[in-house]
Amino acid sequence: MKYYSTNNKNRQVDLKEAVFKGLALDRGLYMPERFPVLEKDFFKRIRSMSFPELSFEVALALFGDDIPHNELRKINDDALNFETPLVQISDSTYCLELFHGPTLAFKDVGARYMARMLAYFTQGYQKEIHVLVATSGDTGSAVANGFLGVEGIKVHILYPKGLVSYLQEKQFTTLGQNITALEVDGSFDDCQRLVKEAFVDREINEKLTLTSANSINLARLLPQSFYYFNAFRQLPVSDKNLVVSVPSGNFGNITAGLVAKKMGLPISQFLAATNINDVVPQYLETGVYKPRPSVATVANAMDVGDPSNFARILDLYQHSHGDIKKAMIGYHYKDSEIKACIKNVKAEFGYIPDPHGATAFMALTEFQKENTNSIGIFLETAHPAKFSDTVEEALGEPLPIPEKLAEFGKREKISRTMSTSYGDFKNYLCGL
């Protein structure tokens, strides 16, 4: 299969080049030339399959032309060695828990898949690969742990100083080896801008082999579609409309869901839940896309003022505001509402969401009040303990910390400071 740039459909590359480059030289994001629609038989068999089994069949449809099937199975089964369970909250509401991987966040799925795919493509490659990652929290930890110790690959994680939770920061600043953490004196948008500038800098690209493990990289993004199929597998059979509520920051997660729908997954409606960084909900309401500087909130993974993957959503729907508005509905919430939701969900259902899952829960609840013939899933993208300060404040009680997360907290932080100047970042890259 060929992959084109969202800025120029005539600029096409193969999967290996799309994974290596991450971002096209014209600053566009790579997209597959087509999305294969899965056979009806797949959906008849899906409830008898395991997560790795169904993911392999979806992966075959997406990547089977470019990676030998036996190699793809190794990548798939090694990456997806944990479950993404569906938990019932009420009669018509379910939660898809995506925090059962090694770093307790949904990004473990895409990061582990990409690490193994990149390792396959770099067999026999003589030069070092440099992975550049901008993170507002969980991407950094998932990528760092997914690539830790992978020979021939060095990872450079840019994160906004003071805007990542304590335990999130510890998960990627304490590893050493082939992982370097760069503490940027700015916002997530600044981190993302620095990474994008590097990808289109010809001088840097002549010197270094760069790729990205953000969701701008297809190898990170497309495997995230697999857990939407896994959620459907676990749902009881129902004639109600399936609605999925997704906490959205850089909009990679919901883009992966829209891809799953393009491939035949019967989701009738997506809900894009954000905090007060509501650029996309505003677009859905007005038809005008106005990026703006992000604002720090208690749901920091959604503190994004110019979501990269919105370009892919525009491409999926041929820039039709009407079609995008039909595909997803936008909701946005303040910090006070998010905290109140965490407390209320615990009190009413005995379940503790993290701040991002809480926003998705509120959007789903709001939607289902007007749409009673629906069965809803909201995504719980990280373990609530990763945001213990916020969750404990909301609950008014201490929150148990999982052992593997507590272990990170005991380690010594190792990071390098960085300004928001691309010149400084370029000097750092030139010194590698």
Image (cartoon, rainbow, N blue to C red):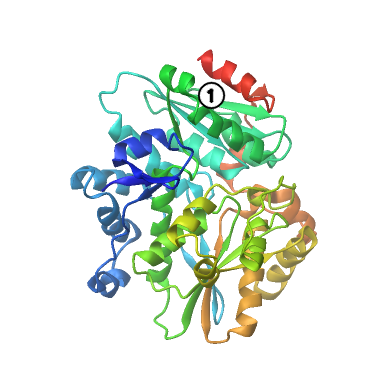
Label 1 secondary element: loop
Q: Position of residue 218 (x, y in %)?
A: 40, 45
Q: Tell me which amino acid carries mark 1.
A: Gly
State which quadrant residue 337 falls in: bottom right
Seen at 52% across and 82% down, the residue is 374
Residue 352 shows in this picture: no
State which quadrant residue 17 falls in: top left
- Which of the two residues, 111 or 313, is positioned nearer the viewer here? 313
State which quadrant residue 112 falls in: top left
Residue assigned mark 1? 176
368 to the left or right of 33: right
Tally the numbered discs: 1
Seen at 39% across and 63% down, the residue is 260
- Which of the two residues, 236 or 333, is positioned nearer the viewer here? 333
In this rendering, the answer to whether 49 lies above or below 311 is below
Residue 144 shows in this picture: yes
121 to the left or right of 432: left
In this rendering, the answer to whether 22 lies above or below 310 is above
- Which of the two residues, 78 or 72, is positioned nearer the viewer here? 72
Q: Position of residue 79 (x, y in %)?
A: 36, 45
For label 1, count other residues whose C-alpha is less than 10 Å away and answer few (under 14), some (14-19) or many (20+).
Answer: some
In this rendering, the answer to whether 149 lies above or below 207 is below
Most distant residue in the top direction: 431
Q: Position of residue 412 (x, y in %)?
A: 64, 26
Q: Position of residue 220 (x, y in %)?
A: 43, 45
Seen at 33% across and 46% down, the residue is 3
